[in-house]
Amino acid sequence: MNFNRIENLTFWGEDRHFCIRAAALGISMYVDTHLPAYHIYRDSDLEGAMEFLDRTDMGEGSKVASHPKLTLSMVMKNESERYLRKVLEEIRDYIDEAVIIDDGSTDNSAEVSLEVLKGIPVRIIRNDISKFSNEIELRKMQWTETVKSNPDWILNLDADEVFENRFKEEVRQLISDQEVDVYCFRLYDFWNETHYREDAANLPQCCGLSFHLHSNPSRYKCL
């Protein structure tokens, strides 16, 4: 008899039964969301397993990507005369594609983005009227449009944010670690190119961490 807490009782159907049985037996269950599920109920279902792998391009002889696809996700508005060009020039060497929400710009921010990222797949979604007054809806839009490209990793970046130099050298190693889903980075507000303030009155944002880089978007839902 086992009186331990049983998680995930809100699930329905076979998922609920699996969770209950695993909890009762003391077995930890994990789901690999890199691939769609193939359910095996009986021995006869094994015959379709290889066909399933072939359909999902994971069968024998399938090609494996040389590295995980890193997608820039950005919201911008009237950034062409600020830091947009510098930010994009620094990240273009390691991103594979970009999804940018142009939230009602009246300048040439979109044209600057296409110019700097020439040679890289870029999709710009233009809002004729800015949605920043309802940032929840704006961020939902950003998420929805970004995951349409089926990225392996998403780099969330504002048009005035830059990483320290060593990020460029280490980012590929970071996103190749299959044991990690999220990376957070300390965020500083700079006064100019070389100076920032850090004291009791002006601490780095988010208690020192900023949520920037995450993987496997199919695991998450924008609420």
Image (cartoon, rainbow, N blue to C red):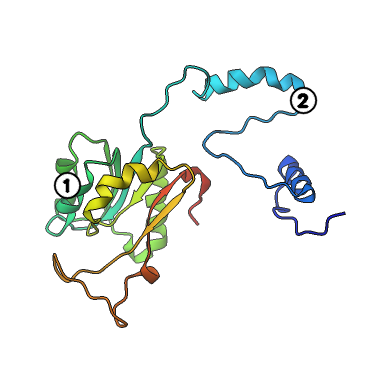
Question: In the rendering, at what x and y percent does residue 141 appear?
Answer: 39, 51
In which quarter of the view is residue 2 placed? bottom right
- When the figure is inspected, residue 200 is found, relative to residue 67, above or below; the finding is below
Relative depth, front residue between 198 and 155: 198
Amino acid type of the residue tagged 1 in the rendering: Glu
Which residue is pictured at 75% across the width and 29% down the height?
41
Residue at the spot x=77%, y=25% of the render? 42
Residue type at mark 2: give it. Arg
Q: Relative to 82, is 144 on the left or the right?
A: right
Q: CA distance from mark 2 to mark 1?
A: 55 Å
User: How many other residues sit within 10 Å of disc 2, few (<14), some (14-19) or many (≥20)?
Assistant: few
Query: Which image quadrant for residue 152?
Result: top left
Percent x, y of residue 195: 16, 70
Mark 1, other Cα within 10 Å: few <14 / some 14–19 / many ≥20: few
Residue most extreme to the left = 81
In the image, 195 versus 169, the foreground residue is 169
Q: Quadrant of the N terminus?
A: bottom right
Label 2: state its secondary structure: loop
Please identify the residue farthest to the right as the structure is shown: 1
Q: Is residue 202 left or right of residue 136?
A: left
Reading the chain from its start, which is encountered first: label 2 or label 1? 2
**x then y, percent, for residue 186:** 33, 64
Q: What residue did someone put label 1 on?
A: 89
Q: Which residue is mark 2?
A: 42
Instruction: Identify which residue is drawn at 19% across, 46% down.
Output: 113
